[in-house]
Image (cartoon, grey):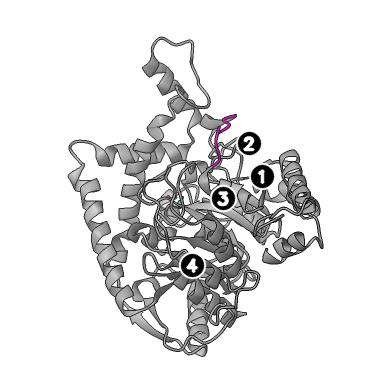
């Protein structure tokens, strides 16, 4: 990614050429992968031409000049539909860009299209989309992971070097693991949520999917920073990103990012996430990560987080509760589609619209969330989930006081087979046990590709290992992840 930007900035290749090549790849892969909801050839070509004109005129072109990127379709984009993969938003065009999209564009990146996802981010497979499932670039008979399925498939297939996703309970990291790429969720507030269609506001973050940790760090460098339009946004280590990226014109490479020594660094393997619930491929990948860290001089110890036994239940109660409130805005009154306009009365029109246009999983979450928040059950479910969240966060904070990062498999194994999880959503939910921890606690987490599966029927499929860091120490976590990546190379 940084090589593309450098070549464009130096005039060795034009933005028009890099972007046209990405558009060609996106179109060629679409029939097989269904990674995109919209591919914007005209818009991307004119954005690329504008960069080439600026360069020709001697104007600055930005650190990501001419880098083709893809954006998950739950992030608002001017001039392109944003559907969140829901029929209820079919045809909706936002009048503004999400802050992260605006910042990427002003750094010179060119959005080539909007990527497929589980409707409103609800799912772990990419199959809950009104536009059909995304397929895995390593095996089209398998899912790409979700909910940022299209972003992961597009990067995994080499269509674009970088894509934006979102991450409420693992939606950037799990698909990244399934597609053999890096997926990152920053500390809560590290990236502005302005223009990200809310699913569960206390858990939602914009995520990044890229080919390397350094690329992800470089993209974060241009997007991070507080935003007056998102009161929960914060400034995270503004100086740290360039170092984590390891390069940037003229910058001295960071020793760790360059694959150096991990002497003095301590990692904690979470005992509860190193056995039951994880398949042999995931455990072998975890062992390989451990060996790689130790080979660079790091100390790896066991840590215990007893609260993980309740993590999935806690996450799904809170996520559904917040979703039931957030999705109340899709009523057919303000945005998108309306069904039954001829009926008498607002309530009937709302019912008809929501009944006809929300998908099954979204309805399930709204029902679950409304129930958990209802007067008689509020304390028993939502109130208790908040207490469990607090306890888990305390356990994680205590563990992260002793180690620099927690290490877990990202997922229970390689990519699920298509339709494997459709009949029983609970079997899909439990696969989020390792990733949802960082959303509940608020800290940063990254999935790094780590080996491939050897099991029958899954041989060669990518696996990922997850590092969870201290809240606010995102650049430090990325430096450790870059070192792990280098050690595994
Ligand atoms: N799979 C989780 C869910 O369905 C996480 C989704 C996400 O991170 N958006 O809620």
> Is disc 2 in contact with disc 1, using a CB cutoff of under 8 Å?
yes
Q: Which residue is mark 2?
A: 80
The answer to whether 198 appears left or right of 314 in the picture is right
Dot 3 alpha-carbon crowd within 10 angstroms: few under 14, some 14 to 19, many 20 or more: some
In magenta segment, residue 96: yes
Whichever of callouts 1 and 3 sits on the residue coming sooner in the sequence is 3
Q: Which residue is mark 1?
A: 113
Q: Residue 252: x, y in percent? A: 60, 78
- Which disc is residue 382 wearing? none
Q: Which residue is mark 4?
A: 239
Q: Mark 4 or mark 2: which is in front? A: 4
Q: How far is the residue under mark 2 from the one under mark 1?
A: 8 Å
Q: Residue 434: x, y in percent? A: 41, 64
Beta carbon of the mark 2 residue lies under 8 A of ligand 1: no
Dot 4 alpha-carbon crowd within 10 angstroms: few under 14, some 14 to 19, many 20 or more: few
Bounds of the magenta segment: 91-97
Query: Residue sitting at 60 percent across and 70 percent down?
Result: 456
Q: Residue 408: x, y in percent? A: 43, 72
Q: How far is the residue under mark 4 from the one under mark 1?
A: 31 Å
- Image position of 27 with respect to 155: above or below: above
Q: How far is the residue under mark 3 from the one under mark 2?
A: 17 Å
Quarter the N terminus occupies: bottom right
Q: Which residue is mark 3?
A: 103
Whichever of callouts 3 and 2 sits on the residue coming sooner in the sequence is 2
Secondary structure state at the residue bearing disc 3: helix
> What is the residue that sits farthest to the front in this orientation?
58
Dot 1 alpha-carbon crowd within 10 angstroms: few under 14, some 14 to 19, many 20 or more: many
Secondary structure state at the residue bearing disc 2: loop
Whichever of callouts 2 and 1 sits on the residue coming sooner in the sequence is 2
């Amino acid at each position: 990614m940084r090589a593309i930007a450098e070549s464009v900035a130096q005039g060795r290749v034009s933005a028009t050429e890099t972007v046209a090549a990405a558009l060609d790849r996106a179109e060629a892969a679409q029939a097989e992968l269904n990674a995109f909801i919209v591919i914007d050839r005209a818009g991307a070509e004119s954005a690329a031409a504008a960069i080439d004109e600026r360069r020709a005129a001697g104007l600055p072109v930005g650190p990501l000049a001419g880098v083709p990127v893809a954006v998950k379709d739950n992030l608002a984009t001017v001039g392109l539909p944003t559907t969140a993969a829901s029929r209820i938003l079919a045809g909706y065009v936002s009048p503004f860009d999400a802050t992260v999209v605006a910042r990427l564009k002003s750094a010179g990146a060119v959005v080539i299209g909007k990527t497929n996802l589980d409707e409103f981010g609800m799912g772990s497979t990419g199959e809950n989309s009104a536009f059909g499932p995304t397929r895995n670039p390593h095996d089209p008979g398998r899912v790409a992971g979700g909910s940022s399925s299209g972003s992961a498939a597009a990067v995994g297939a080499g269509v674009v070097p970088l894509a934006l996703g979102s991450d409420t309970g693992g939606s950037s990291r799990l698909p990244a693991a399934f597609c053999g790429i890096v997926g990152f969720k920053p500390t809560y507030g590290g990236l502005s949520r302005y223009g990200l269609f809310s699913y569960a506001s206390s858990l939602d973050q914009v995520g990044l999917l890229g080919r390397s940790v350094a690329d992800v760090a470089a993209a974060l460098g241009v997007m991070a920073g507080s935003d007056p339009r998102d009161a929960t946004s914060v400034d995270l280590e503004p100086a740290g990103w360039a170092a984590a990226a390891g390069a940037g014109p003229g910058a001295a490479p960071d020793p760790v990012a360059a694959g150096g020594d991990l002497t003095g660094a301590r990692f904690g393997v979470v005992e509860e996430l190193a056995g039951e619930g994880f398949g042999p491929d995931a455990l072998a990948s975890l062992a390989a990560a451990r060996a790689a860290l130790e080979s660079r001089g790091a100390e790896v110890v066991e840590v215990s987080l007893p609260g993980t036994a309740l993590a999935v239940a806690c996450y799904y109660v809170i996520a559904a509760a917040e979703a039931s409130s957030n999705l109340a805005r899709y009523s057919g009154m303000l945005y998108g589609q309306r069904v039954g306009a001829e009926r008498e009365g607002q309530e009937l029109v709302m019912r008809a619209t929501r009944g006809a246009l929300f998908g099954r999983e979204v309805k399930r979450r709204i029902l679950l969330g409304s129930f958990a928040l209802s007067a008689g059950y509020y304390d028993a479910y939502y109130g208790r989930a908040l207490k469990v969240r607090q306890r888990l966060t305390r356990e994680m904070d205590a563990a992260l006081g002793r180690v620099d990062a927690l290490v877990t498999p990202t997922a229970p194994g390689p990519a699920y087979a298509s339709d494997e999880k459709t009949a029983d959503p609970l079997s899909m939910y439990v696969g989020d046990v390792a990733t949802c921890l960082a959303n509940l606690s608020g800290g940063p987490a990254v999935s790094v590709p780590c080996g491939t599966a050897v099991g029958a029927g899954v041989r060669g499929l990518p696996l990922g290992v997850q590092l969870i860091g201290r809240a606010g120490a995102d650049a430090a976590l990325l430096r450790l992840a870059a070192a792990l990546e280098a050690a595994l190379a």
